Amino acid sequence: MPAHLILLAAGQGTRMQSDLPKILHEVGGLPLFVHALRSAAPLEPDTQVLVVGHGGEHVAKVAEDFGEDVAVAVQEEQLGTGHAVLTARDALSGKAGDAVVLYGDTPFIRGETLERMRAARNEGADIVVLGFEAADPGRYGRLVLDGDTLNAIVEWKDASNEQRAIRTCNSGIVMADATLLFDLLNDVTNDNAQGEYYLTDVPALARARGLVARAVICDEAETLGVNSRADLAAAEAAFQARMRAEALDAGVTLTAPDTVFFSHDTVIGRDALIEPNVVFGPGVTVETGARIRAFSHLEGCHVGRGAIVGPYARLRPGAELGNDVHIGNFVEIKNAGIGEGAKVNHLSYVGDASIGEKTNIGAGTITCNYDGVFKHRTTIGARAFIGSDTMLVAPVTVGDEAMTACGSVITQDVPAGALALARGKQENKPGFATRLMGRLRAAKAAQQTKQYKG
């Protein structure tokens, strides 16, 4: 049976104290609502409807940027979750199948959990609600259950003392036939303490029609919602803990796991070793057996097998490191391919460049790639030797097995096998340093005497 996702993302999130819509805040480099969208991937939804309000155009654009195909429904007034779901009705008009309602500020629902809800639907439940056993039920809505049969969902403000004692709580996530869901929502009223149209009224309305409502229970951690900066920090911590555990289980060595930070799409091969205080931004792949040394920052890059990066290295987008490459301390690589076995070990910047295999880049080398308007490319062949403190003024090419002398400013191509020497001729003046320092020291002493007498 086809599935259709309705993602509620219209809340303003005033507790975030932000000009940015709440659901655009990120965990692991990915907006909250995109986490929620992707959690439904195992259901293979035919349609994804994004219900937006505050900042809706921006939210829709971000969804597109992350490759999410969504239909947008605008909730002009926030009149409750039931009203928000009804806003998606036109987008699903004439489409058969199940609708699943998720929330843009609840990023950690697992695909396996949604598949259990689908299984409950296939076993005959007309309405399936996701619940959880709360350590501290607080002000959550309560699930009134008879076994796994759901009799009703009661909001805390409307609950009796007996109902408030229930510890099984409502996540807000619902799955039902789309046509039935919208039909039931037509009967929802706002006769409650909040004066809102509650999606949570649907199970009781279904029961009143003789339909079957069931509850599926998940771990409370999956239902973590983000409503404040503190919640956002807790969500990031939960995400990082999960990513670290997955890396360790996959055969990656983390010498100080709590100090390593991952992005949502970080890929690290088995037997890679990650030292303390490493940060992975989006778009990083590290191959088997590579070593990322302490205090390095990587984003948008690929690190080949057996490569060593750092300590204190920065790999920026477009950095492509071949197998067994060495990138050392205080080296920055940007939009550059570094060939197999090449070394850039000390205090260098390599940007918009191609470096051949087994080439050695000396300390303090800079590819001067920007003329103030355009970026230009530097190409260095295989087995070349670039002397320390070489400035390579792009566009420029250094051939295979060529060399540059230390301190050179290279502005012309260097043929294969050639040595390029581009620096001023050294001139020694005997005794000049001694005489100069004598005059300077005398001038300083005279100045100090004048200040003392004054």
Image: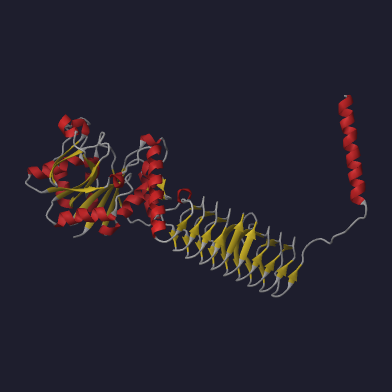
- Where in the figure is residue 101, as x and y percent of width and height? 24, 48
Instruction: Return the x and y of residue 181 as percentages of the image width and height.
Output: 17, 48
Q: Is residue 378 above or below residue 63?
A: below
Residue occupying the point 52% across, 60% down: 291
Q: Do we see residue 160 in this rendering? A: no
Q: Position of residue 399 (x, y in %)?
A: 67, 73
Q: Is residue 408 above or below residue 202?
A: below
> Which residue appears at 62% of the width and 62% of the height?
344
On the image, which quarter does residue 94 sit in? bottom left
Q: Quadrant of the N terminus?
A: bottom left
* 440 relative position to 162: left or right: right
In the rendered image, the quadrant that contains the C terminus is top right
Considering only vertical position in the picture, is 83 above or below 41? above
Name the residue located 59 percent from the left edge and 69 percent from the top edge.
Answer: 341
Instruction: Please indicate, yes or no, whether residue 263 appears anywhere in the rendered image.
Output: yes
Toward the top, the furthest residue is 454
**With 438 as the anchor, is 208 left or right in this view?**
left
Identify the coloring: secondary structure
Residue 412 image position (x, y, % from top left): 71, 67
Nearest the viewer among 409 and 349 is: 349
Q: In the rendered view, does 168 fall on the left or right side of 227?
A: left
Task: Say which of 244 and 444 sits in front.
Answer: 244
Count the marks: how many? 0
- Judge from the rendering whether residue 106 lies leftward or rightward of residue 96; answer left or right: right
Determine the residue located farthest toward the left in the rendered image. Answer: 210
